[in-house]
Amino acid sequence: MTHYDVFNGDADGICALHQLRLEQPLPSVLVTGVKRDIALLRRVPAQAGDTVTALDISAAENRDALAALLARGVRVQYFDHHFAGELPVHPGLDATIDTDAGVCTGLIVDRHLGGRRQVWAIVAAFGDNLGAAARALAAARGLAAADIAALQGLGEALAYNAYGDTEDDLIIHPAALYRLLRPYDDPFRFLRAEAIVARIGAVRRDDLDRARALAPDHASARASVYVLPDAAWSRRVRGAFGNELANDHPDRAHAILTPDAQGGYTVSVRAPLARRTGADALCRQFPTGGGRAAAAGINRLPREALPEFVRRLDQAFS
């Protein structure tokens, strides 16, 4: 029997898996990639008797592959907070889905484990821009301000590393990053022992400085739109810059676009932080769009569709 751990390559997916495997050690084949590579179940060659754990990848985007795995006699455990659509009804599926805007997969797994590895759920929440939820858990645990800041920095670094359109854009592959993390039950020990977080942080600071120097291509009382240049730093910074804009301007929606290889754009959308809803509904109006209520995206927006996207963005958050 082979077990497959299938997870989003960002902080939430990595930390959700880390919590599970700290509590339930299990040799597994890792299947992951860049943050936007969420249709991961189709890459799993599992057969009857094999098992799969899927974390932080939309069931809606993986529905056909999930149904095929179940039909082959594969048992699937699923944790996620993205739009799921209609889940297959099958005795081999154990799904825990919560699409509340204030929840990430790491927090869902934390509930599943009864809080036994909660410090990593705090890292996950910080990485998914759920600062209020992360600080509430940290305060309940009596963590010092300096320790909370360290966990926030770790979460943001793990999240940042997953951004990019291809693995060539990344600082380190998410599977390799998880393997570095796996021996550590204590995030503070990981921070002291491994240099990768400092390396990611340095790249992130440089990328953000480049983005901050740009003016928006569209700005209104309801939304801002930035079209970044065609460069690896742009593709990496897209999500972090969106989160920063959301935190700095919580009453507005924000869209960050980068050119793609087909002549269109890859789009990252943040709903107003004051509302945290509507991003997924907007993005699903376009082919290849999806995500969650507070943060969503479009994998490929044709260049000629940009004016219509800007119009709908303003309309969605009026």
Image: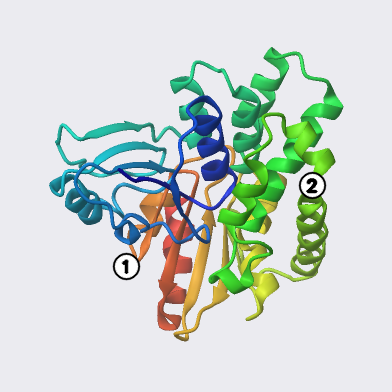
Label 2 Cα neighbours within 10 Å, binned few <14 / some 14-19 / many ≥20: few
The reply to whether residue 275 is in sight is no
Q: Quadrant of residue 308?
A: bottom left
Q: Amino acid at mark 2?
A: Glu
> Which label is found at residue 146?
none
Which residue is found at the position 58% from the left and 67% from the top? 164
Above or below residue 303? Residue 168 is above
Which residue is found at the position 32% from the left and 56% from the top? 44
Residue that label 1 marks: 287
Residue 204 in the image: state x and y as whole percent: 76, 59
Which residue is found at the position 25% from the left and 44% from the top? 85
Q: How is the image coloured?
A: rainbow
Which residue is found at the position 84% from the left and 39% from the top? 192
Residue 97 in the image: state x and y as whole percent: 35, 33
Q: Is residue 293 left or right of residue 199?
A: left
- 94 or 210, nearer to the observer: 94
> Which label is found at residue 194?
2
Secondary structure of the residue carrying numbered label 2: loop
The reply to whether residue 240 is in sight is yes
Q: Amino acid at mark 1?
A: Pro
CB-based contact (under 8 Å), mark 2 and mark 1: no
Label 1 Cα neighbours within 10 Å, binned few <14 / some 14-19 / many ≥20: few
- 27 or 303, nearer to the observer: 27
Secondary structure of the residue carrying numbered label 1: loop
